[in-house]
Image: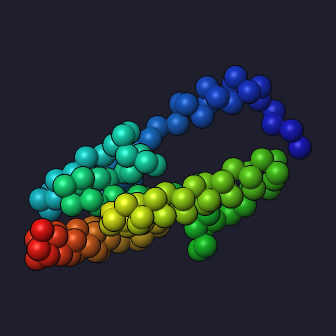
Amino acid sequence: MPDNMSKENRRKTMQAIRSQSKLENIFTKSLWNKGIRFRKNVKKLKGKPDIAIQKYKIVIFIDSCFWHACPIHFIRPKSNLEYWDKKIHRNQERDKEINQFYIEKGWHIKRIWEHEIKKNLDETVEEVVTFINQVKNDNTSSPL
């Protein structure tokens, strides 16, 4: 089934999608309140990570269950299957490419599913704080 929008209208629609969701804002506010300092949606970093701590080479991505095809919650759209299958598959491939890029550059990467934040915000924040503190401790204990 062909897309029912022109390429120009589709482009405008996709550009209107915000890079930050309310859920991400709730999560990052909680992380900030725990004393973690970071930058959000750093454009100069590959993949525009949701959270970046460049000093410690940490990037954190908050993945939507729909856009990144969560194995638990993803529901395949019933119409325009060819378009959506291609779109979701490309998102997953891009995630792998970005993960590989950061691993090869010696960065620490963490991916969080949106459902983890929805299920238990405090637990997810604590998990991320622990991850960040482990990376910080590893960086300070290794000789330069």
Residue at (26% x, 73% y) in the render: 131
Q: Which of these two is toward me, 115 or 71?
A: 71
Query: Quadrant of residue 139 in the image?
Result: bottom left
Let me know if residue 127 appears in the view. Answer: yes
Residue, far top:
8
Residue, far front:
144
Query: Quadrant of residue 102 in the image?
Result: bottom left
Count of numbered tags: 0
Percent of width and height locating residue 52: 29, 53
Percent of width and height locating residue 44: 36, 40
In-image side of 97 versus 51 (left or right): right
Percent of width and height locating residue 88: 67, 55
In-image side of 77 versus 130 (left or right): right
Residue at (38% x, 39% y) in the render: 43
- By what rule are the colours in the image chosen? rainbow
Residue at (69% x, 30% y) in the render: 10
Quarter the N terminus occupies: top right
Let me know if residue 114 appears in the view. Answer: no
In-image side of 4 versus 24 (left or right): right
Residue at (12% x, 68% y) in the render: 144
